[in-house]
Every structure is written in C-alpha cells, then in structure tokens.
Image (cartoon, helix red, strand yellow):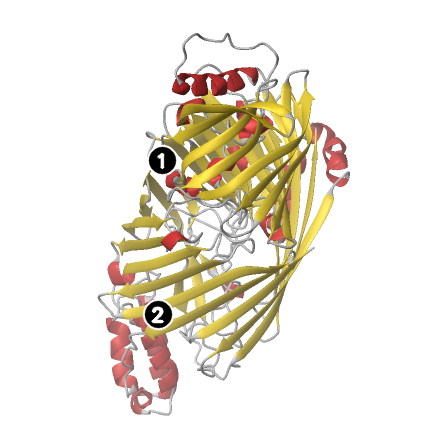
Amino acid sequence: MLIKNNKIAGILVSFSLLVAAPLFAETPEEKGYNIFKAAEDRDEGYVDNEADMLMILMNKQEATSEREMSVKGLEGKGDEGDMSLMVFLSPKDQKGTALLTHQHKDRDDDQWLYLPALKRVKKIASSKKSGPFMGSEFSFEDIGGQSIEDYTYKYLRDETYEGQDCFVVESYPVDKNSGYTRIVTWVDKEHYRTLKAEFYDRKKSHLKTLTASGFKQYEGKFWRPGEMLMVNHQTGRSTILKQNNIKFKTGLSESDFNKNSLKRAR
Amino acid sequence: MNVIRSVLWCALVGACSSNAHAVLEPILEHGEWSAETGLEYRYFKDPGEFGQSQHAAAVRLSAEYFTSWNDDMDLFTFRPYLLLDFQDSERTHFDIREALWIHVGEDWELRSGVTRVFWGKTEFINLVDVINQQDLVDGDDEKLGQPMINLSLVHDWGLFDFYLLLGFRERTYPGTDGRLRTPIPVDTDNAQYSSDTGPNDIDWAARWQRPLNDYVEMGLSLFSGVDREPWYSFNFDLDNPMLVPNYHHKDQLGVELEFLYEGWAVKFEAVGVSSAREEYWAAVTGIEYSFYGLFGTNIDMTLITEFMHDSREDLAPGYLEHDIGIGGRFSFNDEYDTNMLGGFLWDPDTEEKVISLEFERRLYSDLKLEIQAVSVLERGTPEVADTNVEAIADILNSPLFGDDAFSYNEVVEFLAGLIEDEGLQFIFDPNFGLDLLQQVQRMADTSRKISVIESDDYIQLKLTYYY
C-alpha cells in the first residue's frame, strides 16, 4: 500500500506536471472530483513498491511506544484494485502478524489478518474500518488504500499552506461504515500532493488533523512523504508514521499477495 | 521421535539429493535468532484429589532461527521449544515446533519439514483441524510439530494443499503429580495401535479453500491417517493402574463455511468420519456479532454463540458432544494490545457448566502478561458404587467397557483371573480395590466427561519476555 489513498494516501501519492486539462464551467463538485482524479492519475504506473515504516504512538507529552512494519504494494491492472501486504516486525509479541488487503473499486475491500501464534488466517469484516489501527490514531480506513469512488467531492477555495498554493477540497465518504462525515484536504497545485487533511467525526466535530512532510520524488514521478503526523484533538494523543527505504518496481507480482505469502511474510 | 527425526532428515535431504550441501549451506548463513521466555504460575482453588500441590509453576523457553536465500524464494525456520514444569515431570518436555524449509514457486510452494498447521473457522472447537497432535499437557491450544511435505497450489479455483504426513506423534498427558489429570494416569510409554496403523505411518491429507462470493468462504478437506484422538483401555493392573491410549486409523471429510456481512459472522464446521471402529459425524455452527467502537470508545466487542453436536452423543471422547458455547471478546485497540475473552460452555443434557476468562496486555515493549481463570461451575459428579459388586456391574453395563465394547473380553478375562486368584469373595470385600473400581466406573460413565478429567478451578498467570 505504501499508504496511498487520496487522503492520507494522497499524501504519499504525487504527480507529474502533466496536468489534467482544465474544464470549463466546472461546478464545485466537479472541480473537487477533478482535483482528486488528477492526483490519482499522477500516481498511475507505479507498478509496485516496498517500504519500511515506523509508527510512534504519543500521548500529550511523550512517545509511549513504537511499532515497526514492512509494507509491499502492487498496482491493480485495469479495473482491478491495488493489493497490499503489511507485516509487523515489532512489538516483538506481534512479530509476524500480517495484514493482506485486496482493494476493489466496485465493492468492499477484502482484508485478511494472519496470527502467527495460532497459524490462523482470519478474514476481517469491512465494518471494522473506522476502528483504530494497532492502537494508533490512524484508523483502518486511513491506512488501507482507497479509491476515488469511495468519496464524493466539493472544491471549497484556494489557499496557501506553508508557502505552497493549494486547492482546499472537501470530501464525503460514500460508505456508511466510515468513521467520518467529511474530510477537508489541502492539495498542492504544483504536484497534487495531500499536505494536510482535517477529519470530522460522525458527530461532525473536528476529530483529527493529518500533516505530511519530508516529500521526496521517486522514479522521477511519484512523490511520497517521509513523515506523517496524525493528531487527535479530542484525546490529545498523536501518532507519527515514518517511511523509509521506499523502493519502486521491485518486481512484485500477484503471487506475493495471496494467503500463502501472508503466512510467510517477514 | 528418533524415527520421525530421521524421516524428516531424509525428506529434507532427499528432496534435493543431487547436492545436499547446496541446501544446507544457505540454511546456516545470514540467519537471525529470536527467543522468548515465559514464566507460568497456576493457583488451584483446592488441593489435588490425589495429593497434588495447589501451586504449579513452569518455565517456557522458545527460540526461533530464520533465514532466507535465493531472493526470498527459499525460507528456513527452526523453532525448538522447551517446557519445564516444577511439579509434573511428564509436563516437562522438549519439542521441535518448527523445522521447515519453504520453497516458493510462481503459483505454488513446497513446505518440507516439521511444522504446525491450522484448519478451521469456528471458535470453541475446530473439528476439521486434524493435521497436528494436541500438546495436551502444555495447554488446550498447543500443538506438537508434525513432520510433513506440503505442496500448496494457488489456482483460479482457490487454494489447494496436499500433505504427506511423515510419522505420527502421540498425545501428551499430565503425569501423576500434575493437575487436570485423569483419575487413573495415562500410560504414554505403551500406547497401542490398531492393526491398520502405527507410529511410523505415512498419512495424507488435502484441503481446498475458496471464496464462493463476496461474503462466503468455504473449505473442503480430506484426511486419511492416524486419529489424533485416542481411545483408552484399562491395563487391569490393580497395583499399577493405568489407562492405555489406543490409536486407530480414520478417514475424515471436513467442511468449513464462513459468511461475513457487516458486523455479522456465521461459521460452520462439520466432519464425517469413518474408521474400523465407528462411523459418525460432528458439527459446530456459530453466529457472531461485532460492535465496533463500543459506546464511542475504541473498544470492539464480539458476541459469539456456538452449538456443537456429535452423532455419537455420550460416546464421543471429548466433552463438547452436545454443548452450547457463549463467548464475548473485547479488543481494546490500545497501544498495549489489551484483549479480554470470556467463554461459557453449557451442556443442557448433563448440566456441565464451565466458565473461562482470559486477559492479555503488553506491559512494556518486550513483556507481555496473560491471565486465565477457569471455573467448573457444575461438573455433574457421577454416583459411584459403594460395593465392588455394584461397581463391577456398572462397568460391565457401560458402553465403553461392557458388552460389544472394544475391551469387553479383557474385562471378562481380568475378572475371571481375579476370581481364580482371590476367590469369589473379593467382590464383597470393600477393602479390596473399591477405590480403583470406582475410578474405572467414573470413566465408564460416558455422559460425564468433565468429571473424568480432574476439573479444578484455577487461575493462571503468564509473563512472557521477548528477545
């Protein structure tokens, strides 16, 4: 996955300068959709990727625990969704626990969790998506990749964020199991990267803010942030997610993303 | 074990006999070790029925060596395991949980060596899960490593697994000083095999798994080999009474189904079994519902109900022959991975009731705490006879030892021998072996399974440190 949805993932995602042709007389809804479509288009052709991740869980004052993961992602061909495999290296009692995701554009994603102590593969119900991922401030839906069809959009305004010209777009989850009612996203005009996102919960109050930094470009095309910070305003807790050793086109294939590879993931 | 080890060795080396060195060299290079140490303490509410201690302590030592080569197309894992129990010498044991070489191909992989395999979908019992022997002395969910060659094929029609099982592992049991034992100890050194099977059998199994649609996953499995669950015969030695495990060959067809929709899960497992001794079926059906983010917190709660039935009814060897299980799982989804599990088992026919509570939480980054409490609310204590005559009559009438039973002739021979040696009078002498006959009678009462295993309430604390 390499965290690659249009929100958070959008974060890791980025684009070339080949801009989608501007349309005349767009409604704010069309313009919002087109911004995210352009962001998605710019990430096309990544083929596959791998990265090491470090998640740092923090309370108001300090870091309380860390978890290390290794992730692999494969771009879906044609109408197929992307596939990803994430395996935990620490905490050590969780070592070998792995999560396999098959994204689908037209229906709920399939997710399987492997529990090494029991040697058991369990399918995860899709309604779990709003829950926290491994005790962090990221939820399953933040972490799992998402496709552009999972939201409707509305362009709000242009705004400068940290010196970069941005589109500010609001998006609304289609799935009623989402933990959010709306997400406000700052997408930079130059590279269509998600720099910041604000998440509003089911009670419509401001729940979390995500900021992404340390962007690097790979393969002369794909932008990925080195660090993402998710702050929960309601609990004061936050989570930092760092990625490094990001590699593209490592030669992965579908056979690296089935139940057998889930069981032997390291 | 020696046989198994040599078979495994042949399998490992034989699979690539052209150049054994070429295989062994990468296994020893670039590997990484990890390890864990666990301390376990059990406190029993009452002293043991046979004078065993109320306290029990044990240490678990486990290590893992892992290496991969050939661009991760070959992987090797070695996992030795040692359990040291300070009360029960039978519980102290060493096992190779895993010594497995996996070779990965494009749409297939070959796994050779010792490993553990899980089959199944349900929670309280996994009827279809037959590959590994249960490490009963260690715990309910523990399994002994099984030597095998397993070819796994990924196909458009699903996942196909074929297993050659090289040798058979006998079940482990608590010894005389251990708790949770049978009233008459199990003679693990003299297990008997029926004529169609033996400890060095090469058995086979196969499993096919595939999704049927977006919501349903299914599995079909076949097993032809030594039944991991033995029957028991009595050694008829009044000075050193022992139960002897009897292993048989069985053929089993297994079915698994799982339906997931929103927070609902419906799960089903069934087996049909045929052996020289018996034919039967057994099934478990479960319904689960999950509440995600309970009351606005991060806690997920899953409620589980499962119904179990075995067509052998009271003659089934396990105690889950016609039971209802009700459980609740709480995942706190916090940074300590705190989880709680509560389970209640109820047999409406015999009123056997068992409750179990489990709690786990990571204390520091490398230290984990697990607490388990088990209470037998109702064990359905059988009535035992007051005289030898009544006890013998009861045993002869029981389906396990009586007419038509496997050991009927042995029972008759034993009694005839006693009458010859001691005279018929012994059956009226309460000082002659009544205790023992009462224990045999307890086991002969097949409707009261829990009362056979010494069923004491206990609490178990486990601390595991990971290196």
Quadrant of the image occupied by residue B404: bottom left
Is label 1 or label 2 in front?
A: 1
Q: Quadrant of residue A59?
A: bottom right
Dot 2 amino acid type: Ile
For label 1, the residue is B217
Residue B382 in the image: above or below residue A50: below
Vertical side of B241 occupied by A194: above or below = above
Mark nearer the N terminus (1 vs 2): 1
Identify the chain of the residue marked 1, using the numbered disc in the image. B
Q: Is residue B219 left or right of residue B390?
A: right
- For the C terminus of chain A, the quadrant is top right
| Cα distance between the residues tagged 1 and 2 | 34 Å
Residue A183, which numbered label?
A: none
The subunit carrying tag 2 is B
Residue at the disc numbered 2: B450
Q: Amino acid at mark 1?
A: Glu
Instruction: Using residue B455 as the reference point, say whether residue B134 is left or right of it.
Output: right
